[in-house]
Image (cartoon, rainbow, N blue to C red):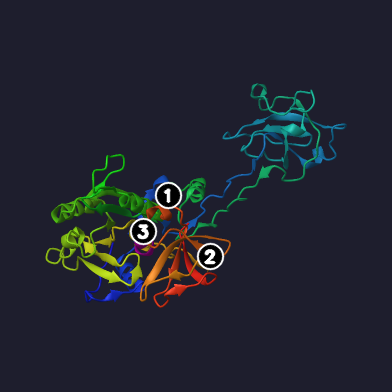
Amino acid sequence: MSSAAPRPADPDHLWSVEEHLEDVLATVRPLEPIELNLLDAQGCVLVEDITVAVSLPPFDNSSMDGYAVRVADVAGASEEFPAVLEVVGDIAAGLASSLRVGPGQAARIMTGAPMPPGAEAVVPVEWTDGGLGEGPVTGMPAHSLVPEGAQGQVQVHRAAEAGAHIRARGGDARSGDRALDAGTVLGPPQIALLAAIGRGTVKVRPRPRVVVLSTGSELVQPDEALADGQIYDSNSFALTACARDAGAIAYRVGAVPDDAETLRSTIEDQLVRADLMVTTGGVSVGAYDVVKEALSHVGDEDEPGSGVEFRKLAMQPGKPQGFGTIGPDHTPLLALPGNPVSSYVSFELFVRPAIRTLMGLDDVHRPRTRARLVADKALTSPAGRRQFLRATVSDGSVRPVGGAGSHLVAALAQADALIVVPEDVESVEPGTEVEVVLLG
């Protein structure tokens, strides 16, 4: 699951975003592959190349309800001069048939039914009189099926080329072809293909299990009444949704009061279902920052190599961060700030790549681009800090939304990008080309 805890650091060291991310990704390891049923494998990453064992489709079959015919027998057929053919029987989908189509003959055939020997094309029923002798019809009445060997006639009013309305054996995929490559994320189309070629199980890296909990005695669950000094717990909902969006199976624990022992026991209880733990709140220098109190020394004696380190990063928002491993399996834990925007930005920069690494993906980062800044005035940024500003991007332009405050969650709901202002830039004029992280 993970390697040893990250390297120790001077508590006064101001870490760069790259340094912190490097430690996170160096510690997290892809999950071990397992064999899963198809539907359980949705969203997982394939770890084996899949080869087609049986051609798809496995036999020539009709793509229409109609009549299987020889091309020569319907050449030149028209409404005025229809080709009149002897109907030798019916071929239904899913049933074996011994019918053959000879000169001057036709077999009535259903969609998906195997083509009979001798037939070279299918004429849709709409091109015929339906075998009723009453002119063209728009359907094939099931009550008038013709038994094998029985006599009947059908009038065909249009010619057909060889192969018309036939799904050729192997036309979709041939036996021995590569169906899917290792590293493919299995979505609905890939699940459909696996089922179509007869694979009921596949070997994949499972979706990571991520446990999210927030800390703070001031936090109240949505739908409950707020007392003085209380706020609703939004972070645990936001980060759980973020984890699911990244591809994880996420469990939301909710708010834990500002009590170190309660937090420690809660985390220990949750380890049984966690490949990654994420906390939010309690990582700065306040008197009640219980995450630091609870986790700073966890594992120092009981679990050598474990432990959570708390750092200051040269970024805004999200300066205080915690990271390490806990428990007997050295489960990675990322401790994020408690301000909503800080926790969200921190998730995108550090937690999402960790989840994608656990999944075994090669590309773990959000895409980035360059866009022209559209703003009423210059953007300011603190010296020595890399700033991430919420924004909307379209048609090569990017516009900030909301202010710089890390508590302004309303503007976050409008943003689909983050403007990146480097550490050595303190002002960005409108019209400047800037780096943008795409969140959509």
Foreground label between 2 and 3 = 2
Mark 1 and mark 2: span between their CA atoms? 40 Å
Element at label 2: loop
**Residue that lies at the very extreme toward the top in this rendered image:** 143
* Residue 342 place in picture, x, y as percent: 34, 61
- Mark 3 and mark 1 in contact? Answer it, CB < 8 Å: no
Report the mark closest to the observer, 3 or 1.
3
Q: Give the range drawn in magenta.
A: 345-350
Q: Which of marks 2 and 3 is nearer the N terminus?
A: 3
Q: Where is residue 259 in the image (x, y as percent from the top left)?
A: 15, 54
**Residue at mark 3:** 341
Q: Residue at x 53, y 65 (%)?
A: 374
| Number of the front mark, 1 or 2 | 2
How far is disc 2 from disc 3 in space, using C-alphas? 22 Å
**Residue 69 against residue 194 in the figure, above or below:** above
Say the numbered circle drawn on residue 374: 2
Residue 42 marker = 1
For badge 3, the amino acid type reads Val
